Image: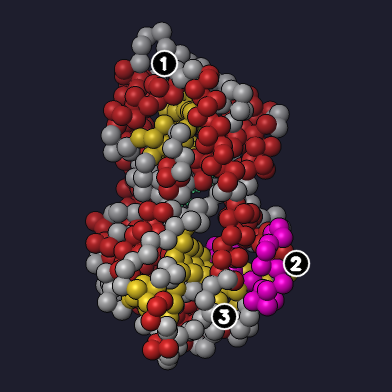
Amino acid sequence: MAHSDTEGDPAMSGKLVVVSNRIPTGDTPSGGLVVALHGALEQSGGLWVGAHPDTAGPGDTGLTEIDRGSYTRLAFHLSEAEYDSYYLGFANSVLWPLCHGRADLVELERSYEEGYMAVNRRVARLLADKIEPDDTVWVHDYHFLPLAGELRKLGVSARIGYFLHIPFPPLSALSTLPSPDDFADWLASYNLIGLQTRRDTARCLEMFRSDPRAEFMTDGTVKFQDRVVSVRSFPIGIEVDRFAEAAATPTDAADLGADMGEQLVIGVDRLDYSKGLPNRFRAFGEYLDRKPEDAPRASLLQVAPPTRERVAAYRAIRAELEEIAGRLNGAHSELDWTPIRYIHHAVDRDLLAVLYRRAEACLVTSLADGMNLVAKEYVAAQDPEDPGVLILSRFAGAGEDMTEALLVNPYDVSEMAEAIATALSMPLEERKRRHAACLRVVRDSDVSGWAQRFVDCLRNCVPTLAYDGLPDEVPERTRSRTPVPETS
Ligand code: ADQ
């Protein structure tokens, strides 16, 4: 990381400890988040702990070192049973649908919550003696909500920060949880809660505001029983320059898409019900139905590798999508043209960058999304002199700041069909103006700056348990019943 104004601060002398469900296993980390955290750890030295990709082993064997360079990577193994209850179960069949507005898909199984808590307790035990008081611990995502609380129980006093990559659930959705009050309690054990957007920050503060255990301080922090926590937004980004460079690098792959019609619309997603894919396909079908005879022939290239296929909702979305694509292709295909190309596997990132640049428009139609990095990758990959148009859901976190994209309601198929028509016929000057505005947002949130801002903020947080056992000693003038909204 670059020089920061907290250098020299005694709080910075410790190492950085990152915890995430996934951990890079190869020599060259790839993917925006992984690269940013890798950069942060290379700078400060430290530790990255995550689940081993091989889940077949026993679940209680301790930590395995998978790499040692300028920092150490340690992996814990999940047993089959833990993978089912902690990962597929509570994380992806309770928390994921809950945070993405799909309480109807939540599967409440007692064993899921037990497995989730047990894995968090086990990871805390494995980690506790590796953390020194002056270390900085950065925990990622919904797999580890209770981790700080479990570490505190084991006496860990270091600063611990948390970043939620997915949307913060609205207050009403929290009642779906088996023990709704736990959510605020889990989060209050962190010193800093980082969220993607101002909307998420407002929701998190609303949760604390409605909780009788919480009290708002005039500096914007929340005092929760004996703990103090800050809530801030840190919109995540991508490695802008690397992506722009890859997109502009001549490659044979540039020929790709040559047989995909005169205009190309691209969509890139993990196959997930939160990404709004069925309505995206329907909107493209409606666009084809309505487009004038003489308009250029357009194709939709959808790259969507299946994930979490052992969860029923993921199998269902795959079947639904294949049915819609088959029907639309049946209705519109010609001998030399297939309107929807649907690819089920991951695509190399450099090739992805080239395809983004080749596409006249990109469809990001999430029904709910923490940020959506595809939106930022598409903008970074464009030729500024002849850019394509981003069609972006209002419900993706990226839509909060990228207001010059064509913002759409992903529930409104006709509006999206119109947006496709608008994008594919947009004059060059308007495309350039919109792209320049979006690119500014993408550059402002470059992922290395994102990691730097979070770690700096965490290191400047109120130390852990500052008010432990001394609640009456908090000066009255710093107490407030009036919520102080905080954004960044
Ligand atoms: P995701 O839900 O995975 O991330 P997204 O932000 O779009 O969603 O990131 C997906 C990443 O995977 C992108 O970098 C994309 O290029 C890549 N990808 C997707 N499909 C691919 C394919 N077929 N081949 C190759 N690469 C592919 C979660 C949250 C998001 C949040 C991110 C980061 O759900 O809201 O933006 O974390 O915080």
* Image quarter (top left, top right, bottom left or bottom right) of the N terminus: bottom right
Please state which of the two labelled residues, at mark 2 or mark 1, is closer to the viewer: 2
Residue drawn at x 64%, y 34% as measured from the top left: 247
Q: Position of residue 424 (x, y in %)?
A: 45, 21
**Residue topped by disc 1:** 334
Name the residue tied to disc 2. Answer: 69
**Which quadrant would residue 312 be assigned to in this image?**
bottom left
Category of crowding for the residue at label 2, using alpha-carbon neighbours closer than 10 angstroms: few (below 14), some (14–19), many (at least 20): few
Q: Which residue is mark 3?
A: 158
From this view, report whether residue 138 is shown above or below residue 1.
Answer: below
The part of the image, by quadrant, that contains residue 393 is top left
Q: CA distance from mark 2 to mark 3?
A: 24 Å
**Image coords of residue 226 (percent x, y):** 40, 84
Decide which of tag 2 and tag 1 comes sooner along the chain.
2
Q: Secondary structure at mark 3?
A: loop
- Is disc 2 placed on a helix, strand or loop? loop
Magenta residues?
1-24
Circle on res. 11 = none
User: Identity of the amino acid at label 2?
Assistant: Gly
Reply yes or no: does residue 323 show up in magenta.
no
